[in-house]
Image: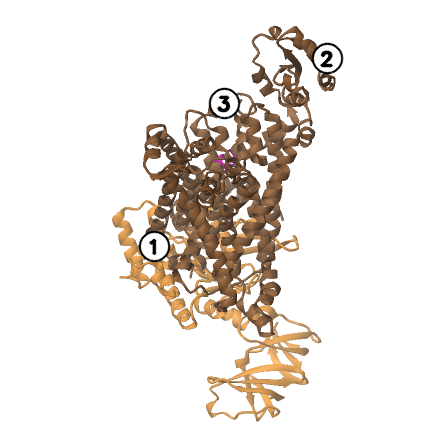
Chain colours: A orange, B brown
Amino acid sequence: MPAKKGLRIEGISKIYQDPKTKKDFYAVRDVTIDIEPGAFVTLLGPSGCGKTTMLRMIAGFESPDAGEIYLGGEAINALTPNKRDTAMVFQSYALFPHYNVFDNVAYGLRLRKNSKEEIRQKVMGILELVEMEGLEARMTNQLSGGQQQRVALARALVVEPSVLLFDEPLSNLDAKLRVTMRTEIRRIQQELGITAVYVTHDQAEAMSLSDQIIIMNQGVIAQMGTPREIYYHPESEFVADFIGEANFLDGKILSTHNDFCVMDIAGHQLTLPNPKGYPVGRDCRMVVRPEAVIINSEGGLPCRVTLSCFMGSYHNYHVLLGDMLVKITDDCPVNKHTFRVGDQAFLRFEDNCVHIL
Amino acid sequence: MSIHQARMLEHKKFLGDPLLLPIIILLLVFLALFILYPLSMLMSDSVYAPDSYSLYVVAEDAEAVQALYEGEKLQEMSVSRQRVMRVRDLEGLTVTDILGRAASTTYMADLLPAAFEGSLVAVQDHKPLLTLQAFPHIFSDYTFRRAFTNTLTLGLITGLGSTLVGLLFAYVDSYVRVRSRILKRMFDMVSLLPVVSPPFVLSLSMILLFGKGGLVTRTLLGIYDSDVYGLKGIAIVQTMTFFPVCYLMLKGLLKNIDPSMEEASRDMGASRWKVFTTVTLPLMLPGLGNAFLVTFIESVADFANPMLIGGSYDTLATTIYLRITGGSYDTQGAAAMAVVLLMLTVLLFLVQKYYLETKTAATLTGKASRMRMPITERSVTAPLTTLCLMISAFVILMYVAIPFGSLFKLWGRDYSLSLRWYEQLFRQDGIKAFRDSFVLSLIASPITAFLSMIISYLVVKKKFVGKGFIEFVSILAMAVPGTVLGVGYIRGFSGGVFRTGFLQGLYGTGTILVIVFVVRSLPVGTRSGISALRQIHPSIEESAYDLGAGSGKVFTSVTLPLIKESFFSGLVTTFVRSITAISAIILLVTPKYLLITTRINEFAEKGSYGIACAYATILIAIVYASILLMNLFIKYFGTSKQQREASKHAG
């Protein structure tokens, strides 16, 4: 295995021209990221946020309009993709249809002038790692989607790149296979300790795979952090809304003491942490996850049920708190009281779960 | 924030590639030198004479000189400084030789009384001359005006005829239930036969069957003064030759019409005829226009058929040819005519390519949702099938006539079988002709196939300055009639590039013939390569690039194997087109090389149909063998259908 290398992206911008309006716009704007050697970093965002452009700039298919990319401390802007120590797993797998599995995986090794025996050993080893041993003579069109995915992964891994790049590799698989494959990818990455950059728009993938998630929106980084940080402490409405389901509550600060404040929400008072030290009288927006809202018939903030829907593993409610809509997922509803549309109910929030933006 | 960094980096990466730049430069030079340069030489030739000439009237003796002085016509010759002198004073000047180079001055010949034709001499003045004389002259030239209207008339008739016949076959193929399997296969074969047949084969059989000594006209019907030459002959032959092109285009279109639209119309009470005129036809209108223009261009550019069967009906292509090879050596006039012909075809081509083609694509998008229920009513099927059958029988008859023509002792007189024409063929220069044609075409094929694949790869997959130019020029070459290209090469290379003597050695060699073959087939190969490459998902090549392959390696290890069918068909198409080519070649070939097509043309012109047929029969056999070979190759070594699907969306 080669020495692990970190990746530093410094002030990267990419400008494209809108084909219709002929106007230039930033696909990526002044993005700086530091990726530790061996880390698994996910670029997450809605389509058109610049995440794939970022990845293609790292691979060398696109050239940045500003900024520099460093791989293990070496500037690589001017290198063509074939000269860069990166390997990409494509969304479409991009397997060579005229080669069988073995030749597909051996492609990169042959370019590196490895000996025949060496190639054989490495290819068989990597096929074993992705659990594809015995299928090396198959043509790629005789493989299932998941198997093709494994071959694509093996082909990228076998050249022992410093950085592994993934471009939404699981988006063409069905839901169940996607879950299996993402655990596989994580396992192999951990086993090899390879640095990985992973692009996806699927937050479940991002959550389950990453050491670090970078959420991008309109070409800039919206937030960077561990999955936990991003889920529980979103820094913006966009991030809160994009990751998981979110309720937004509006309120006003009545009083503050130390790191806490008393918030007025729809005429009811609630004590919350105030890490940003907002002053008294300020209008604030808060975010709370639906599963952190508890609906009951005893006490809390009074509300009225507008939607009640049984979903199997949970029960889904929409309630009106003042004039604010609050979505609630009530887990394991089997032994609980079911509210009907029009019922009066009460809300409580789990501790430390209401977060001021 | 500077937007230039990306451009700079792209630049750096581009230059960092060891293969890309040299190849692109090589391509640019090739296209510029062998397509653009000769054409621009034509343009400049028609307005610019490098040397001006003074005109002299030469007569044998004093009395003739006197007669010239007194001749009324002489007074009209005020255009140039004329002087009358004795021929003795012009020692060492060959009259026709100098006349040939004197370009515009030869028009004066028209003004002289017939008795003195050929008594003009031009003497070089060594003063370059910018003159637009050539254009007004050819436009006032009766021969040209007639050729021009002839060409347009012919194009119109052929275009309409081919589109109609093509539509008929396409409609029967996709709409009408033809019960008989054999009939269906026959229609299919007939509509594809002429695509692969050498040019002028149909002209030859037309003469054999319907000419003065024709089998049908004279022997069967007893008509002794049948005249197959002229407009009707060319129009019929061209229609038969070009309708398959329309058929293939229209068939593709009809397949894309969603049958539910027609069913909706029928459901609301329309008759079959009403459905055809209100739904099918309007949907196809841009496509029909497209097919019409394509055949119009083909007809206008066609040289071989008008040459053989045109008789006195001269078209632009034949007139240009005669201007150059005939007595007058009027190269400037020929250049001006070639420019007119070129403008005509290029203009039509641009309309077809950039207007009609996009319009066709816009009206008929998407695929038919279901299979179409074929029409079974006898009132529709019977007349349409009969019509198709008649045309098919006619085409087959035409093709059968050729091998028989080579086997009969003397067509028109003695219909007993013999091999004398083949004997004669092999005793004379037959073997050399086949060898020359074969070798030259065989050299041109791989060059063209490889070149067109590289061009399409660069055009589809790469970004660089000059890409638009490469694509445009290599496709534009499709619109250049062979005759025009031939004249362009004569003007461009006979004195070396820009008449400097550079590359002069090229002229008259086999190399220039090979280059002509390459240029003539390049657009076809490039077009097929481009459409094949557009089917391949870019990420397949990107992944090879990403794994460490340079652009050359990506091309040879991934791109080329995926489009090998297109490559191979380019190989065979070039071979077939080259071995059957005549229009440009006939102007450039020197006695050093004998080519099958020019031999056929010679013999047919002389009336030696037997030996012409023998040549043509062997030629047809070669062409079919190569196409058979291609199909075999694609069947056994081609990318499988699944593989192709896989490369399309890759997963």
Q: Is-magenta flag for residue B28?
A: yes
Q: Amino acid at mark 3?
A: Gln
Q: Is-magenta flag for residue B279?
A: no
- From the top left corner, tell me how far across and down residue B432 is, in percent: 36, 29
On the same chain, marks 1 and 3? The answer is no
Q: Nearer the viewer, residue A308 or A288?
A: A308
What chain is tagged by disc 2?
B
Q: Label 3 near label 2: C-beta < 8 Å?
A: no
Circle 2 residue: B70
Question: Magenta residues, as a range?
Answer: B22-29
Q: CA distance from mark 1 to mark 2?
A: 93 Å
* Crowding near the residue tagged with mark 1, few <14, some 14–19, many ≥20 C-alpha atoms within 10 Å: many
Q: Is residue B275 above or below residue B320?
A: below
Q: Amino acid at mark 1?
A: Val
Direction from residue B97 to residue B554 in the image, left or right = left
What chain is tagged by disc 1?
A
Q: Nearer the viewer, residue B433 or B112?
A: B112
Q: Is residue A234 above or below residue B552?
A: below
* Crowding near the residue tagged with mark 3, few <14, some 14–19, many ≥20 C-alpha atoms within 10 Å: some
Residue at the extreme front of the image, as rendered: B222
> Nearer the viewer's eye, disc 1 or disc 3?
3
> Which SS type dominates the magenta stretch?
helix
On the same chain, marks 2 and 3? The answer is yes
Q: CA distance from mark 1 to mark 3?
A: 52 Å
Circle 1 residue: A105
Direction from residue A147 to residue B227 in the image, left or right = right
- Mark yes or no: residue A79 visible: no
- From the top left corner, tell me how far across and down residue B373 is, in percent: 48, 69
Circle 3 residue: B504
